[in-house]
Amino acid sequence: MKVMKFWSAVRIICAVLLAALLPAGAVWSGEKDKEPYPKYWMSVSTKNFSIPGMPADMPSLGGMFGGRMGGPNRGLLLQLNSPRPLPAEPSATHDIPPGQSMGGTLPLIIPPKPGAERSGESAEGPGQFEKPKARMLIYWGCGEKVKPGQPRVLDTEKMSPEEFGKAMSGHFSSAQYPPAPRTGWIYSEWPNEKNRVNIPGNSSLEGEHVVHGNYIPDIRFSIDKKHDFMAPVEFTSVTGERTESMKVRWRAIPTATGYFAMAMARNEKNGETIIWTTSGVPEPGYGLMNYLPGADVRRLIREKVIMPPDVTSCSVPKGIFSGSEGAMLQFIAYGDDLQIAYPPKPKDPRKPWNPLWAVKVRLKSTGMTPLGNPGQPDEQQAREQGSKSPGKSPGAEGSPSEGRAKGKEGSGSPLNVIKGLFGF
């Protein structure tokens, strides 16, 4: 799956270079508590891969990306931290409402300690590190034409890691500290090695929830419709070729608080990665493709980085992906996060507050779709290929246009588009 491997490589490069910007001793895995109390997080997600106009009899794409077959996939991650001493036989579980359709309870299990031997893994070290090589062209903004001052060019061979990392930093959100393995704390989670349940398409989180066990107090809270699984991202149309301006339209998601999208492609001939985002200001997008606190979403909407929830279309500027093998669009809809503590935090900041526990429910819905008929050469490439193949006219037997004219599954069909993108 060459596109997936390419995206992973780009993210690794960015992570390595961004690490150079962190101050010495920076810690991202936890926060210091003056008065420790149990914290419980529910990370709720919906993901969908879709192609507008895809035939009804086309094989489902869910299984191609690690999810269940049959359309959009729902995800749920439960994480618990408790400062209490570890019992001899620790146990904790999350009793769920009937509408969740996943059984009566979800057991929270303490994972194996890090560093334990795992089959199939090499005992060798990471090897010698080499400075990654990357040249990126970054575009931004919805519109049919490229705006002045674009693209921003980033080249690791001409920039220090600090310079490259700063250019890629963008508008990062506030640091979030979900429960995680920490010294002096008990950590447990679901799904886990002992229990994994597929989440049905009609599953609902609405109703009463109770988390209880022998190393936490009873945690009782309710989830309303606004904080249930979000509707899937559905693209209603994607029009235009890579040499043109491409128009992307999507259905509004009722509980979304904002939208953001980024597209990426690779021009092998020039050795360049092209990145475009929907942001109205320079933004590479890497720090925004995940859960965001509600306050950050509202702030980034004001700063014209994130699109308001009433926006349902955006145009990709003309020709920025020309010469690439095809671009892939990543889209995220942010949900409103729910935060509950017991007893509730007093409105008067001068009053002391000693909560017994706190819960956070965070939500997102993500989608992907190809842009500009990926797997097909653009007009310039087609002309070059045609000049090298005498005797073949644009409508000659065996050409893509011939296949489409006869109603066959030509190389530009949705199924072959996916096969070409992911190497099936």
Image (spheres, rainbow, N blue to C red):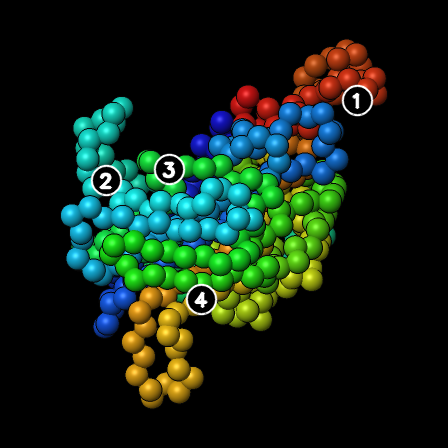
Mark 1 burial class by Cα count in 10 Å: few <14, some 14-19, many 20+ = some
- Residue 173 visible within the image: no
**Of labels 1 and 4, the one closer to you:** 4
**Mark 4 or mark 3: which comes first in sequence?**
3
Judging by the rendered image, the residue that carries numbered circle 3 is: 195
Judging by the rendered image, the residue that carries numbered circle 2 is: 112
**Mark 1 to mark 2: distance in Å?**
54 Å
**Of labels 1 and 2, the one closer to you:** 2
Judging by the rendered image, the residue that carries numbered circle 4 is: 339
Query: What's the residue type where badge 4 is placed?
Result: Gln
Label 1: state its secondary structure.
helix
Mark 2 burial class by Cα count in 10 Å: few <14, some 14-19, many 20+ = few
Q: Please name whichever residue, 80 or 296, is drawn nearer the observer in this view of the structure.
A: 80
**Mark 4 to mark 3: distance in Å?**
26 Å
Label 3: state its secondary structure.
loop
**Mark 1 or mark 3: which comes first in sequence?**
3
Label 2: state its secondary structure.
loop
263 relative to 222 in the view: left or right: right
Asked if the residue under mark 3 is in contact with the one under mark 2, i.e. CB atoms within 8 Å, the reply is no
Location of residue 350 (image quadrant): bottom left
Query: What's the residue type where badge 2 is placed?
Result: Pro
Asked if the residue under mark 4 is in contact with the one under mark 1, i.e. CB atoms within 8 Å, the reply is no
Judging by the rendered image, the residue that carries numbered circle 1 is: 404
**Mark 2 or mark 3: which comes first in sequence?**
2
Location of residue 345 (image quadrant): bottom left
**Mark 4 or mark 2: which comes first in sequence?**
2
**Mark 4 to mark 2: distance in Å?**
29 Å
User: Residue 224's x, y, as percent?
Assistant: 56, 61
Asked if the residue under mark 2 is in contact with the one under mark 4, i.e. CB atoms within 8 Å, the reply is no
Is 230 rendered above or below residue 340? above
How many dots with numbers?
4
